[in-house]
Image (spheres, grey):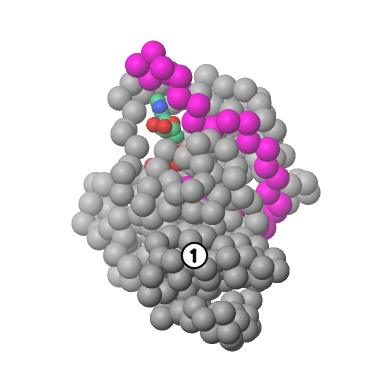
Amino acid sequence: MTTTHTGPAIVTRGLTRHFTSRKQTVEAVQGLDLEIGQGELVAFLGPNGAGKSTTLRMLTTLIPPTSGTASVAGHDVVTGQRDVRQAIGFVGQGNGAGHRQLGRDELISQGRAHGLSRADAHRRAGELIADLDLEAVADRKVSSLSGGQRRRLDIAMGLVHLPRVLFLDEPSTGLDPQNRINLQELIQRLHAETGSTVVLTTHYLEEADALAGRVIVVDHGRVIADDSAARLKSGLGDLVRLGFGSASDAARAAGRLSRVPDSRVDTSAETVDLRVKDGSAMVGEVLADLAADGVPPTRVEVARPTLDDVFLDLTGRSLRETQQTPEPTATEIESEVAA
Ligand SMILES: Nc1ncnc2c1ncn2[C@@H]1O[C@H](COP(=O)(O)OP(=O)(O)OP(=O)(O)O)[C@@H](O)[C@H]1O
């Protein structure tokens, strides 16, 4: 791996991409300002149509920005397209490997295409086949592999030339839960072993939470949060959900709870949600106060915040709900090949 570039792995300034679809302009990515350091493992999280793939496609030089700039491994994605491509690995949503080839041959060809010598390409293919647990299937035709095996082969294809920056677009989509977990472990291990910068997109909250040191939440083409999953969640605070016998009791309790310092109270019918920094520590005091005021709750739950709660707080929508209503696929597709 060449390590001449010492600055951030990725820098974007005002990165913007519009599409024209049925004479309407779709503002897929709107003025992204990002800095991603070398060796970070970052997840782009957001609902369908948020602009995750479009961002990745610009960073991997597949489409040019409408305006703004981006550099990857020190090279501009427009003026240094060739250098960017040398420095990165990209695993897109489809399968990259040719279906009638043998998996091992695909890997060797990919290595050769990236300038490895024949011997190095063979050695590297062998290493990846072992690392990605593909030994049993590497000498079979790609078309005969299962979805999970194919995804692992795709990842091997993205890694064959030891990229400094690896982009994975929804790597676990279409995999069953077990394969998804296997793949997550694999990404973590590869990241730890190679020290490459890894940027992945995902719909899966659990995946972003489990994998990434940093979570960038995007919606409508903009960054709406950028932090570690732990800090995003702790910033929101725990949820103490209290149920009451009637809406009037809930309203009285909400009045009392609005005096709890550094808290937020939301009432809905017979339920009051109290957001506080440390729910478990607070709940005893809260229950005692409510009992003293004659409105003891009939039900109490304390929950740690999830990333979905963070998303709901930021956007007013649940990321889970937004997954039920995917964006319609663009019908008029612009040319995706950078000029
Ligand atoms: N080639 C295109 N032509 C027209 N519109 C497009 C094109 N590609 C993407 N879009 C639109 O740009 C917006 C962002 O799409 P993008 O694929 O980046 O979102 P995403 O966050 O990756 O979504 P998903 O999770 O569904 O993959 C959407 O409204 C999409 O319909």
Asked whether 21 or 250 is in front, the reply is: 250
Q: Residue at x 27, y 53 (%)?
A: 142
Q: Residues within 10 Å of mark 1 (few under 14, many from 20)?
A: many
Residue 282 screen position, x and y as percent: 62, 80
Count of all numbered marks drawn on residues in the image: 1
Q: Is residue 303 shown to the viewer in this render?
A: no
Q: Can you say which quadrant of the picture contains the N terminus?
A: bottom right
Please state if 149 lies on the left or on the right of 238 as rendered: left
Q: Quadrant of residue 263?
A: bottom right
Residue 296: say if magenta: no
Please state if 11 lies on the left or on the right of 105 as rendered: right
The extreme left residue here reads 144
Asked whether 26 or 199 is in front, the reply is: 26
Amino acid at the residue labelled 1: Ala
Residue 40: say if magenta: yes
Q: Is residue 251 shown to the viewer in this render?
A: yes
Asked whether 278 or 293 is in front, the reply is: 293
Residue 276 screen position, x and y as percent: 62, 70
Magenta span main SS: strand
Q: Residue at x 54, y 44 (%)?
A: 218
Q: Which residue is mark 1?
A: 251
Q: Which residues are magenta?
A: 19-46
The picture quadrant for ligand 1 comes to top left
Q: Residue at x 62, y 84 (%)?
A: 285
Residue 213 screen position, x and y as percent: 62, 62
Residue 262 screen position, x and y as percent: 69, 66
Please state if 57 lies on the left or on the right of 148 as rendered: right
Q: Is residue 307 above or below residue 105?
A: below
* Residue at disc 1, CB closer than 8 Å to ligand 1: no
Please state if 147 lies on the left or on the right of 109 as rendered: left
Q: Quadrant of residue 10?
A: top right
Q: Secondary structure at mark 1?
A: helix
